[in-house]
Amino acid sequence: MAAAAASTTRYHHHLLRSKNKEHQSSACSQLFGGWEDRIQLNANAAGQSLVIGRRKISSGKQPPRPRHLVVSPKAVSDTSSSLTCLEPDASSQFGIMLPSESHLLQAAFDSFTILYVMIMQSVLGIILGGGAGTRLYPLTKKRAKPAVPLGANYRLIDIPVSNCLNSNISKIYVLTQFNSASLNRHISRAYASNMGGYKNEGFVEVLAAQQSPENPNWFQGTADAVRQYLWLFEELDVLEFLVLAGDHLYRMDYEKFIQAHRETEADITVAALPMDEKRATAFGLMKIDEEGRIVEFAEKPKGEQLKAMKVDTTILGLDEERAKEMPYIASMGIYVFSKSVMLDLLREKFPGANDFGSEVIPGATSLGMRVQAYLYDGYWEDIGTIEAFYHANLGITKKPVPDFSFYDRSSPIYTQPRYLPPSKMLDAEITDSVIGEGCVIKNCKIHHSVVGLRSCISEGAIIEDSLLMGADYYETDTDRRLLAAKGSVPIGIGMNTHIKKAIIDKNARIGDNVKIINSDDVQEAARETEGYFIKSGIVTVIKDALIPCGTII
């Protein structure tokens, strides 16, 4: 946000510093948009001054002394341009003490930043953890879907949480009902100590499904999950609910999303992804009018029904060439609801509806509510299947530009700090791969693979086109000697083992001379008692599984 504001203000340098009052007022008006009634620029004999929220900040030699404000740094950010979060009870009066030599431009910029951050604090993020994750099984055998490891160092939940934090949304709930122990642990370690505190209302908390006298059922769907916790959400002093999915991989600026929702005075805004005809048949499509208002929905249409869902995507901001290639828009499962609208829809209009995408939002459209589409034209992947998960992870190794990059200083992806040592590679040959923290890799070959944290790979191993999730802990030399004495296998990849097109879940024990290469090209197989599954031709070794020495899969 700071970078965007800085680029906005470059044009206004000379205007704000100008002695021409009209120029100054014009620059201030453009910088602060709809806040004209709270912002006024005065020029007098004593020098320039900026009035913000009817509190004056003077750039003269003896500025008036405003009330002290408590500020805290933006949560878990390591960027040099981090914004600050103003205490909530200061919303009625804004004031910044500037050094006597500060320029008026700095006052305008700082005030703009604080105003915008405070506006975004009026949004509650609600991340839906999804169901049992049967399509991602066995990765979801012992963990909730948002807790599945991703990209060597991260977990899926880090994506929407980081997008929220980078968009100055610091009130976040994660709703889940399956295997939530590891998700709870990760969130408490990654975010709890950074979010809360005196005068800071930020939080990231897990809300598990629970039974009550009023509702003895578990979550029945996305809308039902939110409905069951409406009593909690409505207590928060927010204007909008931002509803997100916990199993998507993308980077998005929600500030622009929220701003579009407010500017169009929408009741609901749906994030929309432009699609070509080939991909469109796998998604729920939307049709819009000339104002970008959604007028029709179709779930995975084909044939003539598909052609009827074509829209002019230039209405949403796509250029003409891209609009011809992408004549469809699909729902991303990301929504902004005005608070009052959400309460009314779930309690009064559709008290029995279980799903947002197929029931609540089409129902709101039929009632004549203003449901807007917001175009997102970037990388986005729904990680709902083993195949999609596999390709999304290996996509970060693509060169010269990966499908999704974790290396973006302006909007980093946060995760749990583990304080692991740098990875050690001894006579290893590694190409086109991503290696996590704390790995020990000895005299082996790794190509086009993602190697997760604490991975131990022994001499002579060959890893190709694979995802290794690593381990939750290290085994000591004493542990390894005891295991060897018992004829067992230590955590990691054994000597002279060959792994190709596979996912190796955490803490797996792969013995020496094992071959996991699916030489028979089996597409589907369930071998849970033997420690693995095959889905879409991809071998997945179960968490904590033991694959004995000499095994061929």
Image (cartoon, rainbow, N blue to C red):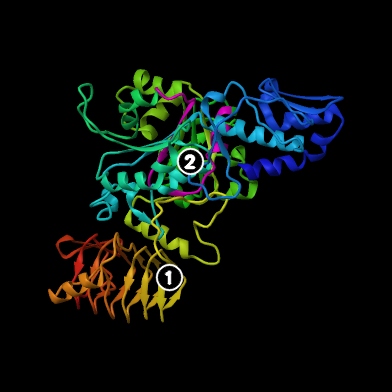
Residue depicted at x 24% and y 79%: 513
Q: Nearer the viewer, residue 434 or 205?
A: 205
Q: CA distance from mark 2 to mark 1?
A: 31 Å
Looking at the figure, which quarter contains the N terminus?
top right
What numbered label is drawn on residue 247? Answer: none
SS category of the residue bearing label 1: loop
- Expressed as whole percent of the image width and height from the top left, the position of residue 353 reads 32, 27
Categorize mark 2 by other alpha carbons within 10 Å: few (<14), some (14-19), many (20+). Answer: many
From the image, tell me which residue sits under label 1.
Answer: 448
Residue 297: x and y in percent read 44, 34
Q: Position of residue 291 (x, y in %)?
A: 59, 30
Look at discs 2 and 1 and give the one toward the viewer: 2
Give percent across and percent down for residue 531: 19, 63
* Contact, mark 2 vs mark 1 (Cβ under 8 Å): no
Q: Residue furthest top?
A: 348
Q: Relative to the observer, which residue lies in front, 137 or 154?
A: 154
Is residue 57 shown to the viewer in this render? Answer: yes
- Pick the residue in front: 267 or 396: 396
Looking at numbered disc 1 in the image, what kind of residue is underneath it? His
Kindly identify which residue carries mark 2. Answer: 164
Q: Quick check: is 260 in the magenta stretch? A: yes
Does residue 519 belong to the magenta stretch?
no
Residue in view at x 34 percent, y 48 percent: 186
The quadrant of the picture occupied by the C terminus is bottom left
- Residue 300 seen by the camera: no
